[in-house]
Amino acid sequence: MLTERQDAAVIGGGIAGLVTANRLAQLGIDVVVLEQGREEHYLCNTRYTGGTFHLCLLNIMKDESTLKQAIIALTGGFVSETLAAALALDGRRAVRWLRDEGIRFMKASGADVHSWVLSPPSRNRPGLDWKGRAGDVLLRTLEANLIRRGSSVQRNTRALSLIIEGGVCKGVVAQQGEHDVRYLANAVVIADGGFQGNAALVKQYICAYPERLKQRGAGTGRGDGVEMAMAIGAKLVGMDGFFGHVMSRDAMTNDKLWPYPYGDSLATAGIVVGPTGERFADEGRGGVYLANAIAGLADPFSATIIFDHAIWEGPARHGFIPANPHLPAVGGTLIRADNLEGLARELHIPPSGLVDTVQAYNAAISSDKLKSLAPPRLTSRYSARPIATAPFYGIPACAGITNTMGGIAINEHSQALRKDDSAIPGLYVAGAATGGLEGGPELGYVGGLTICGVTGLRAAEHIARSRGVTSVQG
Ligand SMILES: Cc1cc2nc3c(=O)[nH]c(=O)nc-3n(C[C@H](O)[C@H](O)[C@H](O)COP(=O)(O)OP(=O)(O)OC[C@H]3O[C@@H](n4cnc5c(N)ncnc54)[C@H](O)[C@@H]3O)c2cc1C
């Protein structure tokens, strides 16, 4: 077997991998990036990204303690104090570091969350729009910087197993075309983007019917990192949660319906019902929570978003590429009827089931008893609106999975952990392959790009320090 030798090997050429590799090279560490994609512009979630750097949908430049508390509160304490502090402290540093690398940011709207968005952003139209846009430009820029620093992205190179000697990670074996190559390295960084593209792992941890989830990203996160880590006894955390959105079920077959528009603003303004017409999840907890709840149904193709004309003309028109008018304009099913019985019949839902649900829901709004509903309906993030103004609407829904939230447990230096929480020497994890940085019981969405930036910088800097580089922060 061919053997290569580097100080560090990074698995995956998305934002997490390229931030790690560039920071390593900047600090004088000899690094190679192994990337399974063959194309010059290989696909990955970063290539498709919307490009908003935020923490819990807050401006990343907000003061550290506000951000840290927001992360802990949103994830119901699932993210540890230490990791929350790392994200709150270094999110802004990641943005500034990227700016120094030549990445351009813009304020994309007046909303706090859009204060730091990759430029140029995607255009305001349904379907995929990545060429020459946010993530694509970022990847091209970071790869060019890496080459300028004397390193490279080795395409068509899929990492498949870790080399472990005496409990220490000493390298990785990868398949390069027809051949296996052994990359010996003092440090290996797993940055393979998660396991959403691995049907067996998704079935084991997330959804009995992985084929009934819409891949809302590139699907290139094949879970190789998780499988390599499992094979050496690493700790996995939060494996059952994913970042995603409520989508039109037609997105399964109509490419104009993903990654945008998605149905979160409709689902959180109206209700989401299952096959009997009953609500099954708290819509007030947001689109990521609802997407996970839909994935958890006995049949993930049995959810329907129900709303009325006031919602269709109100919240459905808000946000980026809103459902009104985009969803029906590109062929998404929008069922409309003058009364709820007629709507239920067209949706193949028992009419009495839907009518009872809507009546109970409307009554709970007017008597301020939404918390007593089963399931309850929170109003702290999204106000509940009565479903009372004809015509009434239904959209057959499905769950769109963008990337898994769980993965390999890390410490604040991005070192992979064993089940007893001790660090595995030589092994690091960055980006969507990590676990413990978002999710938890509330499925709190902390922010994928910020997680990538912070874990990538921290992995690189810890590796550099352990190689004797003294001029590194941290
Ligand atoms: C449509 C869309 C919109 C989004 N919008 C936002 C947003 O606005 N804000 C935000 O914070 N997040 C957003 N996200 C999520 C964010 O883009 C991701 O969290 C982030 O890009 C993940 O980066 P990564 O480097 O971890 O993974 P990726 O970008 O997926 O990169 C992983 C790379 O590893 C490679 N790879 C996988 N397995 C192997 C292997 N065995 N060997 C070698 N290579 C391998 C893959 O081919 C891939 O190139 C969005 C995602 C999508 C899809």
Image: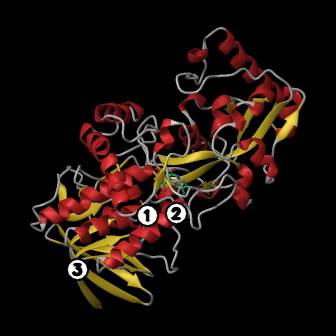
Residue bearing the label numbered 1: 223
Residue 217: percent from the left, percent from the top? 56, 59
Three-letter code for the amino acid on which mark 1 is drawn? Gly
Distance from the alpha carbon under mark 3 to that under mark 2: 29 Å
From the viewer's side, name the closer residue of 208 and 62.
62
Residue 290: x, y in percent?
Answer: 58, 38
Label 3 C-beta lies within 8 Å of the nearest ligand 1 atom: no
Sequence-wise, the earlier of marks 3 and 2 is: 3
The kind of residue tagged 2 is: Gly
- Label 1: how many Cα within 10 Å (few below 14, some 14–19, many 20+): many
For the residue pair 324 and 390, the one nearer the viewer reads as: 324
Image point (24%, 69%), residue name: 26
Q: Are marks 3 and 2 in contact (CB under 8 Å)?
A: no
Determine contact: label 2, label 1, CB under 8 Å: yes
Q: Specify the label residue 6 is tagged with.
A: 3
Q: Is residue 420 left or right of residue 353?
A: left
